[in-house]
Image: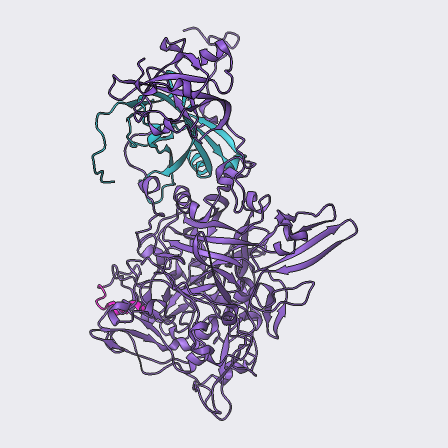
Chain colours: A cyan, B purple
Amino acid sequence: MEFFIRKNSLEPILKMQLVQDGRNDFKSFNDKLSNSSIYFSMKDVKTGIPKILNAKAYIVAKTSVSVNSPVEYYIYYKWKLRDVNKSGRFEGQFIVYFHEQNCSELIVPIREDLFINISESFVGAPCNPPC
Amino acid sequence: MGTQNLNNFYFNKLDTKINYSEYYDLFLASDEKDFNTDVVWSTGITSYNDGDLLPVWIDLNDTSCSTQPTTTCEFQYPTGNTPNYAYSTGYTPFVIVSKNIWPEAKSMCDCPFNNYGYTGSTSWFEICDSQYTGLDNGLFNEEEVLDGYCIYLVDSFSGVGWTGGAFYPHTYDKRLKMTQVKAYGHPNTGLTNQWYTDTSILNNSDSSGYYQDLRGGFYQGFYKLYGYPYEVLPTRPKKGWSFETYLKLNVIGNAICDGGEDFINPCCQPVGDESLMCGENGNCYNTSGWNNMNVVTTATSITFGVATNVCSPLTLPPYSLPEHLLNYSVAGLYGVSTQKNDNGGFFFYKGIRAEDKYQNRGGLSADTQLDTLSACTTSGGVTGCCNTVEKEVKLTNQNKSPDPRYDVYSNAFGVRLTDDMRIGYRTIRYTGECITTGDTTGIVPPSHPWEAGGTTGNTCNTGSSFSCGYTIEESYSDQICQFITQSGNCADIWIQVDVVFDRNLYLEDCEIYNNGGINDLVKVRLDKFERYGSHVENSGNPFGCNPTQQAQETKPCKDQYPRFIEDAYFDFNCHGAQVQKWFVEKEYRLGTLSFYVNGRRVHKVENYEEIIPRQLNTNKQTQVGVAYNMSWGGGALGLRESLIQQRPAPWDPCVLDGGGSNKTTFTNLDLTPDRRLISDNFAGSFVGGISQMMYYLKPLSADEIYHNFLINKDRYSLIDCEECKNCDGGCIDCLLPDEVEPTPQSSSYPIHTYLACSGLGNNVPTYLQDGGKPVTFVIAEDSGATNEVASQNYYNLIGTPSIGTVLKRSILQNDGVTYIHQCFEYAGVQTFFSGGWNYLTLFGAWDGIQQLTIYPLQPNTTSSCEDCCNGCSSATP
């Protein structure tokens, strides 16, 4: 999986969602996710040097398609400037601790690696940034 | 194809298949913003600017919500004769209002109304029938009742020029208003103002700002007045609701620790091996105002009580009970007795605040107090909306329920934090069930339990009989946040509490009232049925919904029908159609009730049946402000402090007369068993600090609750209980109040560190100039620069350099041409921790950090920064 972001840009956020292949009880997973702690790590694929180590990641609810549909969550990591101040290719992983299951751990993604590509940007902040 | 032969097997005998159902995997989501962006980006609490979702938000530190009064015990619990009590502002109940408004809120007639007071072109609506019930929770005091004080409704205070109206207890606009509960029961008749129950609230402040300490008192307010043009919250939200508050848990007993030592949770730190002093439930925290201490010495074990600093006197030692708090007294027919009850720690309540004090008590003999008032009627000559003249009604014995308890059934819900630090709810549930008799014929039980006998005939056609009743339903979590309550440092601490009800089904429009709603219980008189058979779109009319389609109602003022009890009433006949429908449609009320502490779920109740507040089963005039209540910091008094008027013969007892020998006086209402359901189960309060409360018209999801936690984390020094419970002081979030930051112990990394030499040229960035931040050097093994000084290869070759060794490294400046030299002094191997970012990594030649490129260190080493830095700023590579 390839995620792309420009150097010194905070969006798009990195978010992941459950593989719903019909084999899992997604309601149960989202319920467990609602009481969990999530951390994100990212290392440079070239040097192996960690760029982000166990930084706090969170859950955010998907927009419901129906008023009666159960809540589903993404897990996401919100970039900080120091995370994206260097271009390169990185590998990222999330570790999820489910608190209502005696803090059992899940490291994702499992089947396919997640790569974050931070590409160079040639624009800089204007003199008077609006935000 | 050959014939099948069981002895020949043509296929692989062994096959494998990965079973993906045993684990979950995640994949990268699209960049589409199909998520709650507020949770990710907002710097305010969830829906802070949306009255549709957050109609109630009260922050005591915000002057638009509170005048932030200061007070003392002298004013909160006067123990002497205080004749100026009625009018002196020092004794006036505190008032708080929401800073948000529900857009559909109504606080004035929809139709033209011009009967009452005028200011310019704007009028206010006056409800003087509040005198019949306003004494019972202290909204009015005795003198105010006798002087004819009323409730005033306005569209806005600015419209009528009442600039101070927001914090006056008897004037209401579209914001939810709550007032401090006052308990006027049990007056000492010899003095003007002395009461039994302590409802004190004291002011306080800390780093979170202004807040209030509840010392027996709490806030209560109504959000709808049945039959009057006032409704500032919906009675049944479409999908659910959420309540959030910030409470300060108090330590009780800390001052009595031996030798002045503090608690080391849950016990005092022993002095030598002499003694060990522990709080009740192994806990130094307490929510009811009193802790039972157990002292263990080498010789004996004794117990004694310690109360928090309350305004009212305690019982004698060793128990020292705060007997004037609701939590430590029980009221009954023969007065009040001192004992700890099981109502302590209520901090949220919703529903009816008291039974009908004017209701005939079914099955009992004459009621002297009510019989005296049997000829009384409510106020006459009252003008309602559309300038209609309202009929006066009889004051007593009008309730259509069999006894006062029925109004409480499925109409009272409270949330509490117990002394042993468990959070949960209590409600009084109306129940109905088929009881198997084994017979299809037999004695049909009477409709109501107080009725005698029965008739012979068919029972249930299933061989069962249907029986109605009530049950006290409650459910509590395990001990919350054990990092605080079990192993913490016993300092007062703030917590965030969320309670969320999420109904299984989303309901809207008429469904809200018809599908499991209170219309199930309403019986409308047949001759009136057609009149109520219309549904007016957007009328906000709870009773305008009926499947019968009629011509559209044109007069919006009809939103008060069907008028209880003239046209309709709640029919609690256990075998009647209404009650049966109520129970059959239970599925529409089911949902999940969840409790969160500091953003983490601590308790979940599946298939919880929601409580839908409803009005009393009587005329609107005798229930002003009794139904549709909400309390913050406590439960409800019920009729525990209820007073009823009396007047010496031969004077008319129905007249409220404030002067002379024929003056009306008030006496305690007889608290018979059927009038005590609320006071026995909800007359309690949280003893501790309160700061904020929010009431959402939606079930908050876990991410929204945690977002609110993050927003308020710094203000209240909140900790994440789930991440701290096994942390042993390892993470920064786990720092408790007054606790020194512990040395981190997790995720440590030994790093070769250098400090930049000072006194270098201006071209070098300041973070390298001052030498304040340690630096380490890294180089990629595939960069070709294998002789990079201080690279991993460097240490492999020469081992660890001696501390004080100075290295020189040339730095390519931003122009890509100029180099300067930077000197670094080796500081040895230091340990750093993940997430700290308190050291700087300078990479090899190919890498860029902070727009600065570091080239290999010079191979020559020097003995001091001074020697190295000669010509630092003009060096070449």
The extreme right residue here reads B299
Q: Residue at x 38, y 73 (%)?
A: B620
Q: Is residue B186 left or right of residue B148?
A: right
Q: Nearest the camera: B654 or B484?
A: B484
Q: Residue at x 64, y 52 (%)?
A: B260
Magenta highlight on residue B96: no
Seen in the picture, residue B144 relative to B3 is either above or below; the reply is below
Seen in the picture, residue B341 relative to B501 is either above or below; the reply is below
Seen in the picture, residue B238 relative to B655 is either above or below; the reply is above
Q: Nearest the camera: B699 or B238?
A: B699
Image coords of residue B573 (percent x, y): 47, 66
| Quarter of image, res B521 | bottom left
The residue segment tinted magenta is B551-561
Residue B463 in view: no
Image coords of residue B127 (percent x, y): 35, 75
In which quadrant is the C terminus of chain B drawn? Answer: top left
Q: Is residue B168 left or right of residue B320?
A: left
Image coords of residue B623 (percent x, y): 42, 72
- How many labels, in total? 0
Image coords of residue B336 (percent x, y): 60, 72
Magenta highlight on residue B552: yes
Residue B729 in view: yes
Q: Is residue B733 left or right of residue B478?
A: left
In which quadrant is the N terminus of chain B drawn? Answer: top left
Q: Nearest the camera: B515 or B102?
A: B102
